[in-house]
Amino acid sequence: MLKKVPFYLVTGFLGSGKTTLIKRFIECYADSKKIVVIQNEYAEVNIDSCELKQTGKSFELLEMNNGSVFCVCLLGSFVHSLSDFIHEHQPDLIILEASGLSDPISISQIISAPALRNLIWLAHTYTVVDALNFQKTIERVGRNTHQIRIADTIVLNKCDLLAESLREIRSKLLMINPFAKIVETSFGCIEFVPGSVFHLPVAVIGTELYESSGRPDVGSAVIKLMKPVSPDNLDLFIQKYSLITYRIKGYVSTTKGSVAVQTSFGQIEIKSVNHNSYHTEIVIIGPEIDQKVLQLEFENLCNQN
């Protein structure tokens, strides 16, 4: 009979730093623990797995895309996929990186599912909060409140970018979840204690107190192209859509080499990658996203080279 495996949940809105936090986790413990990472992406493709593989550490990866594992659209298939994955790989611990748009208030449905309740136990829940954009996300996206509400530890990230005092943000976080420990950090640098048993907040134990906010009214698009785009035209596209979307992330082939792109609430980061084998594959998430319009616009920019 398999031993119950500790299950760690990492939540947080788009661009808050969840993947960076998990990279830290992997770097710390992959040499001594057999780790399974589950990446749940709201869009149909997963870009962040490439970032985790850059650690050079050994871990098993289960990808669940095109929806949230907490919604009925994926919940059933996720439970059975995870059960099969555990039996196959027999990990020491499991980390679920939830979609930034997920509402994890129904985590108990996963933990108590017949196919999983004898296989996993909820060890700890981390919620990553972007200190710089906290006010924007908490006002725009109700599910962000639920992410904070279920946390054992709130990782208040990107504190190095915030000029004003964190006191007001901490106060608001504790109003939402007075049970949570708040850790202020930058670049997801915190000390992990895998295997420990933590007190679970009421919201996790009794999820009937809160109603799931359901599937978000948010669209997603994936742009895939072989043809490169000029850096200037890429800048035009990114500048335009970074202001009206929640998140843009992926790789782009330009006429001067491949680059990695990510945006969050108007903040833009574009970096050259080590080699030029990346073709364009970017995920765009935000309100009123139209796949065909975005694809056509980007293709037109490529044709203007």
Image: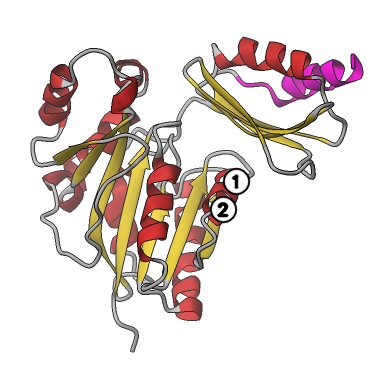
Front residue of this view, candidates 57 and 251: 57
Quadrant where the image shows the N terminus: bottom left
User: Which residue sits furthest front?
Assistant: 274
State left or right for residue 120 relative to residue 101: left
The residue under the point 41% across, 74% down is 91
The residue under the point 45% across, 54% down is 75
Q: Is residue 57 magenta?
A: no
Which label is found at residue 110? none
State left or right for residue 249 relative to residue 90: right
Q: Is residue 293 magenta?
A: yes
- 240 relative to 11, above or below: above
Question: Badge 1, how many Cα within 10 Å: few under 14, some, many 20+?
Answer: many
Based on the displayed image, in which of its 4 quarters is residue 261 positioned? top right
Q: Which residues are magenta?
A: 289-305
- Residue 170's x, y, as percent? 15, 26
Camera sees residue 211: no
Q: Considering only order in the chain, which callout, 1 or 2, is on the residue closer to the N terminus?
A: 1
Q: In front of the other: label 2 or label 1?
A: 2
- Residue 21's x, y, as percent? 37, 46
**Would you name the residue on which mark 1 appears?**
46
Front residue of this view, candidates 1 and 161: 161
Q: Name the amino acid type tagged 1.
A: Asn
Secondary element at image label 2:
loop
Secondary element at image label 1:
loop
Which label is found at residue 54? 2
Camera sees residue 262: yes
The residue under the point 51% across, 56% down is 55
Gap in angstroms between the C-alphas marked 2 and 1: 15 Å
Question: Badge 2, how many Cα within 10 Å: few under 14, some, many 20+?
Answer: few
How would you classify the magenta stretch by its main secondary structure? Answer: helix
